[in-house]
Amino acid sequence: MPVTDPELVKIVQNRVFNVLICRKCGAHNPPGATKCRRCHSKDLRPKRKELAKVKAA
């Protein structure tokens, strides 16, 4: 069920997209992290900010 309230959409997008991804193990880390919570690697990247494109059937 899609979210239609604009305020809720902003909250959801912030929770989903505002994370860092470890390049070594793929774990999600908080935005202020300097090393991975799982493997302790320092090779982190921000999550891509694009929404997935839906294929037309």
Image (cartoon, rainbow, N blue to C red):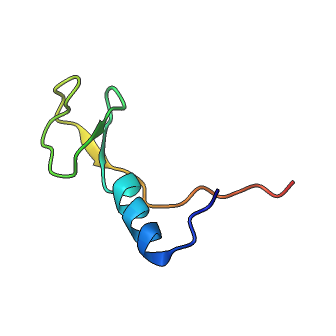
Is residue 41 placed above or below 16 in the rendered structure?
Answer: above
| Of the pair 33 and 7, the residue shown nearer to us | 7
The quadrant in which residue 38 appears is: top left
| Of the pair 2 and 13, the residue shown nearer to us | 2
From this viewpoint, which residue is outermost toward the right? 57
| Of the pair 2 and 42, the residue shown nearer to us | 2
Number of numbered tags placed on the structure image: 0
* Quadrant placement of the C terminus: bottom right
The quadrant in which residue 40 appears is: top left
* Quadrant placement of the N terminus: bottom right
Q: Residue drawn at (21%, 52%), measured in percent from left and top?
A: 31
Does residue 22 appear left or right of residue 10 in this picture? left
Q: Position of residue 55 (x, y in %)?
A: 76, 55
Q: Residue drawn at (42%, 55%), measured in percent from left and top?
A: 48
Q: Position of residue 19 (x, y in %)?
A: 30, 50
Q: Position of residue 7 (x, y in %)?
A: 42, 75
Q: Residue drawn at (51%, 74%), measured in percent from left and top?
A: 5
Is residue 22 placed above or below 10 in the rendered structure?
Answer: above
The quadrant in which residue 4 appears is: bottom right
Is residue 56 placed above or below 9 in the rendered structure?
Answer: above
Does residue 37 appear left or right of residue 53 in this picture? left
From this viewpoint, which residue is outermost toward the bottom? 6
Q: Position of residue 9 (x, y in %)?
A: 47, 68
Q: Residue drawn at (18%, 29%), measured in percent from left and top?
A: 41
